[in-house]
Amino acid sequence: MTEKTHLSSVLKSVEKPGRYTGGEYNRVMKDKAAVKCRFAFCFPDTYEIGMSNLGVRILYDVLNRDPDIWCERAYAPWTDMKERMETYGLPLTAVESGDPVSDFDIVGFSLHYELCYPTFLGMLKLAGLPLLSSERGEDGPIILGGGPCTFNSEPVADFFDLFNIGEGEEVLHEIVRLYIRMKEDGAYTRTAFLRAAAGIEGVYVPSLYEVRYHEDGTLYPYVPKYPDVPTRVRKRIVADLDEAPYPEKLVLPYVETVHDRIVLEVYRGCIRGCRFCQAGMIYRPIREKSPETLCKSARCLYENSGYDEISLISLSISDYSRLPELTDKLLAWTDEKRVSLSLPSLRLDSFSEELMKKVSSVRTGGLTFAPEAGTQRLRDVINKNVTEADLERAVGIAFRGGKSNVKLYFMNGLPTETLVDIEGIAAMSKKVIDCYYALPKEERPRGVGVTISVACFVPKPFTAFQWEKQDTFEALAEKQEHLRQCITDRRIRYTYHDAKTSFIEAVFTRGDRRLSRAILRAVELGAYLDAWDECFDFDRWMQAFSDAGVDPAFYTTRGFGLDEVLPWDIIDPGVTKEFLLRERAKAYREETTPSCAEHCSGCGANRLGGKTRWCRK
């Protein structure tokens, strides 16, 4: 049988064949003989997840605006499809052309979550490409990584040729244009290209640095192998978001995806300074889009897609300085079209009755808030800057507005946490029930439900808590069980994250290059799609660590020294280590830091420039 016959036969026997057929409306098709560089944008998760990723949508649009570049997409096949591809020798192919990914010039991977690492390697294997960068020949594609995980890319540094650090709209295009120019000039070799690419701001080429370890396993500072290689790689940002490209059309899938809606990115960065939050630091400085730009994008995307929901996204949408103006402009036409507005990242202290009415204009349901900690003391430690009074006011507005279900996000295992703080989670949840019954019967919706979701703290790079240790399994289990016993109201539903998953996440978010051996071994043992609960196998990971001679506790339950060289010190995110150390000290003094809107605390992100009204120049 031919390869196409195999594929046709296979699609009849797998779940959701629409994941693999392509042919979507608004996909970009080009004459491959007429382009100068073919770029395969790979997402190491299923089609439904990848098709909902805003970063992929933006960069797919950016690259395809250049007539010399054809950017196509590839996603991780589900386990049934992967098994059949291996059985019949079917390679990983691009959705648009159906060509093997190995035929492309550059293959880029979006690294959005540490547990996707084995999936990325699984996709390389399906493509028939060498897993280690040191084993790739001149004729093979360049393997490029981007996304939030690249702010500590060391655990996967041996697998990638280069990384795009920071926002990709400009730097990714510069990398591809450099490739085209060197090919046209006859100057291209893999080595020469990587050396030249290292000169682009925001590009990290791991093979160009010498990495050494002390006897105790800690790192020496990285040393560039050549004088023209930067000692630190500064992240790239887009200075003016109003001028930045944004898709005018969305590729419309034939199967249901996680986010079947229009997504409007309102701004980047965050004026808050939660000390556990990596995104709030690595996406600084704060840059906003104007309501005019956002409304133009929303109308254009609606006309080109027909979606009936617009989601306004940012790290904290209610902190957008022109939110009332934006929502008024959108509601001027969305009400008539029966298009609902979704605001998924609301803060307790900036939620208002006016905002409630706008969100409820078309669709009703529940609301989600994130107090993060159960006591004011611990909220001050993490610099959450919300109070119990904020919660009472916000849920009161929600209940009066017809919302009957409230979801609250918390964490356990935070620095300085005690069982009293855990008990506070149960008390806050019960307070929401009490607020419901405190309202007159005629003012409240029918029924009430509170869901609390408790995640395990993972100390992330470029946060004030990057030096902290993670709780042991035993400590986390004790806290989880203690909270369960404290919840006595049947209207409160309690869910919590698996501590084993958080442990593996912590290993890789804080790890160094020695972990590549463990990741390779895990893949050999069958690791794939580990971001999915049904595929994650903790014992397999522990076996992989053991086989690779790696102690995972070295990266988790061991606190890092304040003067220790950290694996991610090679990256300059804008925010300075001095600022993070100041914030850590304030955490242990239980002192808060005001938001950027109230006072500039000198985090250092202003060094990156950008059109922002928040940073002190």
Image (tube, rainbow, N blue to C red):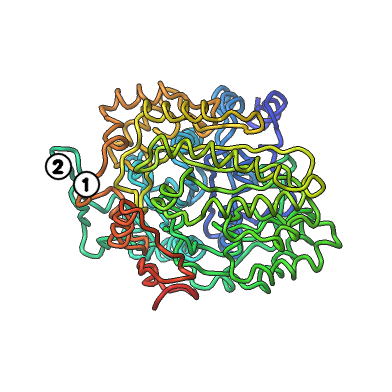
Q: Name the residue under label 2.
A: 214
Q: Mark 1 points at which residue?
A: 561
Q: Which of marks 2 and 1 is in front?
A: 1
Residue 404 visible in the picture = yes
Q: In which quarter of the image is residue 349?
A: bottom right
Amino acid on which disc 2 is placed: His
Q: How many labels does the image show?
A: 2
- Residue 526: percent from left, percent from top: 45, 24
Query: Could you tell me which residue is drawn at 37 percent across and 29 percent down?
Result: 475
Amino acid on which disc 1 is placed: Gly
Q: Is residue 110 left or right of residue 360?
A: left
Disc 2 + disc 1, Cβ < 8 Å: no
Residue 142 visible in the picture = no
Image position of 225 with respect to 437: above or below = below
Q: In this view, does 473 lie to the left or right of 337?
A: left
The N terminus sits in image quarter: top right
